[in-house]
Amino acid sequence: MKKLILTLILLFCIQNSIVLAEDITLVFKKSDKKVVTIDLQDLKTKLKTHKIEFFDPHYNKTKRFKAFALQDVLNLGFKNNWSSDKYTDIGFKALDGYNSVSKIGLLNEDGGYLTFEDFDFPSWEPIGRNKANPAPFYLVWLKENQTTEFGYPWPWQLKEINLTTFKDQYPKVYPDGVAKNSSEFVGFSIFKERCVRCHSIDNQGGKIGPDLNAPKNILEYRSQDMVKEFIKNPSEYRYTHMPDHKDLSDQDLDNLIRYFLYLDKNKMED
Ligand code: HEC
């Protein structure tokens, strides 16, 4: 009889797939290398739990969850150094492999919460077009305008958080092997700050302006002086979506040219 009851309990557990807090885990990675895995039990012990209630645009109704503040979670997993200059982006990977990538800067803002329990639905309420179960974790934002339209990540079925560097993301834009204090590298830094959101190098980067290295490097068909002049004052040449960069010094422009020359040279060596 005892055995039968135990079997029945076991069957009940399997059927309802009761998951223990120790089995629910979140993986933290840097440049795709695992740093640490933390289970829900541990998160609950180490972090403050918040009860949040807000209008959830993905459910299109008011929802109530138990959650951790996202910054607390990141500070625990990455030991407070996730917002250093080294990392530019952060990817949130779901169980099905879908990766939503956001700029790290956004995560310095308050308002992000990692939910782990739906107050009104013990085994979560299905979400999205595919009626997915959002477990184990669902990331939400409470402030106005913290929506996916403005680049805030709202992944559900979250299982992995990965910090990426510019180099991981755009290896062809990054001048590997040049010294950090060289003109090439300084030119690259300017490009990274001000140009890559619109321009690509070998198809990596922004798509608003033309690629500046492929199929031909810009300096193969424009003179250096022309390019420098244009970067500084495009509006004097054409009506264009490229903004003027009047604050760039001659030295800055020379460094950009050195970076373009470096790209050209490295392309030929391929
Ligand atoms: C907001 C988007 C945007 C930004 C930021 C931007 N560009 Fe452009 N750029 C464009 C567009 C669009 C063109 C396409 C041609 C045009 O409209 O004049 C262009 C054209 C160019 C050209 C080619 C001109 C030609 O016709 O041969 C160069 C070189 C260039 N950009 C360099 C830069 C550099 C260097 C930076 C950063 C300092 C930069 N751009 C920042 C949008 C941008």
Image (cartoon, grey):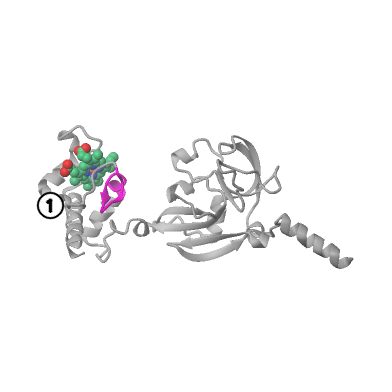
Q: Quadrant of ligand 1?
A: top left
Q: Is 32 displayed left or right of 131 in the figure? A: left
Residue 190 point in image, percent of width and height: 26, 51
Q: Residue furthest top?
A: 239
The magenta-colored residue range is: 193-207
- Where in the figure is residue 161, as x and y percent of width and height? 50, 56
Secondary structure character of the magenta stretch overall: loop
Is residue 4 left or right of 24 when viewed as pictured? Answer: right
Horizontal side of 75 relative to 117 (left or right) equals left
Q: Position of residue 266 (x, y in %)?
A: 20, 62
Q: Is residue 198 magenta?
A: yes
Residue at (56, 55) in percent of width and height? 73
Of the 4 image quadrants, the one containing the C terminus is bottom left
Of 195 and 186, the residue lying toward us: 195
- Toward the right, the furthest residue is 1
Element under disc 1? helix
Residue in the picture at 20% in, 32% down: 239
Q: Position of residue 32 (x, y in %)?
A: 44, 62
Residue at 23% x, 44% y: name it: 210
Residue placed under numbered mark 1 in the picture: 220
| Residue 189, image quadrant | bottom left
